[in-house]
Image (cartoon, helix red, strand yellow):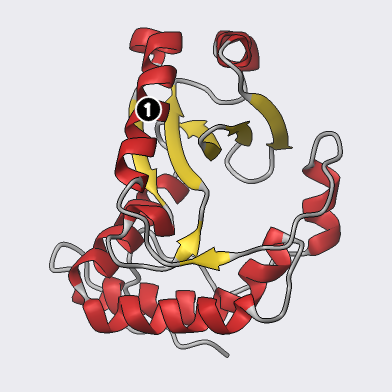
Amino acid sequence: MPTHPLWRPFELADLDEVAAVRIGTQPPRTIEVVPYDEGWPAAYESVRSRIADALGDRVLGLAHVGSTSVPGLAAKAVIDVDLLVADSADEPAYLPDLEAVGFVLRVRDPAWEEHRVLTIETPKTNLHVTSADAVEPRRHVLFRDWLREHDEDRDAYAALKLALNERGFTDSMDYNNHKAELVYDLYEKAFTADPAHPHDPQPRA
């Protein structure tokens, strides 16, 4: 049974495991989903320039991902950026230079493709660092592009996010778990429609 090379089985994040890979503490903030802001692409460009200036040719890929990268989609006002480097586990090769321009390391997760998350406050940004061969950044781009091209699915995703907005989540991964079923189903649609890779549907259990 063929499956798309970017397919992952459906599962929810274990919140205890998530807490174990976080670095430092931050005061809880209520997650707020807001209407799409036309200024988000420019905010991404400012972050992209800061990273490119700090790392130069050590940047093997940069992409604006997440909901702020989809025109018309309601989102948390946080710019999500994927940075690809030669080896994300080799923190001395990139972390000091990112810290020098204001980024703070918040997550170190060796088990998840050596994923690191850094943040800045202005513009509020989550910078996801992985190695160039990681799978998750390619999933992010596929999901972004699917929502950019399919208004009905974008609107369904927005409706769910706005409904969850009423529940006052303070943990981003708990919030993500409540979106996980729809996100999985949208990935299934994108995988099945991809002409480059055969994919037999893998419905959630």
Image quarter of the C terminus: bottom right
Q: Which residue is most to the left?
A: 195
Q: x, y (%) of residue 164?
A: 62, 80
Residue 58 image-quadrant placement: top left
Is residue 38 positioned above or below 190 on the image? above
Q: x, y (%) of residue 192?
A: 25, 77
Is residue 7 positioned above or below 124 on the image? below
In-image side of 110 versus 153 (left or right): right
Q: Nearer the viewer, residue 31 or 84?
A: 31
| Mark 1 Cα-neighbour bin, 10 Å: few <14, some 14–19, many ≥20 | few
Image quarter of the N terminus: bottom left
Name the amino acid type tagged 1: Ser
Residue 111 visible in the displayed image = yes
In-image side of 134 versus 22 (left or right): left
Is residue 178 positioned above or below 64 on the image? below
Q: Nearer the viewer, residue 93 or 33?
A: 33
Q: x, y (%) of residue 139?
A: 39, 56
Residue 41 image-quadrant placement: top left
Residue at left 81%, top 35%?
23
Residue at left 42%, top 77%?
158
The residue singled out by tag 1 in the image is: 46
